[in-house]
Amino acid sequence: MNGKGRSIDNIAIEINFKALKYEEVYTNDRQNIVGVRTEIIRYLDFYNLNRFHSALGYKKPMEVYRKERLKAA
């Protein structure tokens, strides 16, 4: 950690939450919490398993994670 209040400490998770809010939460209208939870879980699965990320060389996060785990083993 770089110290209290440093924005770079949380940049990765903040980018993830921004994507979640702008791509899922703000664009869809739901009437109950069950629908919200279901759609957020669905979106996070999509984000990690199916969505290509430019910061990862247009690879999927889970694909990169699994390759790194195999290297470490």
Image (cartoon, helix red, strand yellow):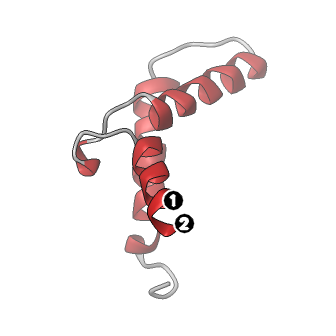
Residue 73's tag is 2
Left or right of 64 in this view: 24: right
x and y, in percent, of residue 13 in the image? 48, 56
Residue 29's tag is none
x and y, in percent, of residue 44 in the image? 55, 33
Left or right of 9 in this view: 38: right
- At horizontal 49% and vertical 50% (from top left) the residue drawn is 66
Left or right of 29 in this view: 11: left
Q: Label 1 amino acid?
A: Arg
x and y, in percent, of residue 37 in the image? 70, 26
Instruction: For marks 2 and 1, give the one nearer the viewer.
Output: 2
- Label 1 SS: helix
Q: How crowded is mark 1: few (under 14 residues within 10 Å), some or many (20 or more)?
A: few
- At horizontal 70% and vertical 16% (from top left) the residue drawn is 35
- At horizontal 42% and vertical 59% (from top left) the residue drawn is 12
Q: Label 2 amino acid?
A: Ala
Disc 2 + disc 1, Cβ < 8 Å: yes
x and y, in percent, of residue 43 in the image? 53, 27
- Label 2 SS: loop
- Is residue 15 positioned above or below 12 on the image? above
- Is residue 12 positioned above or below 60 on the image? below
- Name the residue tied to disc 1: 69
Q: In which quarter of the image is residue 19?
A: top left
Q: Residues within 10 Å of mark 2 (few under 14, many from 20)?
A: few
- Is residue 5 positioned above or below 23 on the image? below
Give 10 or 31, whichever is nearer the viewer.
10
Give 28 or 57, whichever is nearer the viewer.
57
Give the residue furthest to the bottom.
3
Give 69 or 6, whichever is nearer the viewer.
69
Quarter that holds the C terminus: bottom right
- At horizontal 25% and vertical 50% (from top left) the residue drawn is 55
Label 2 – label 1 distance at C-alpha: 6 Å
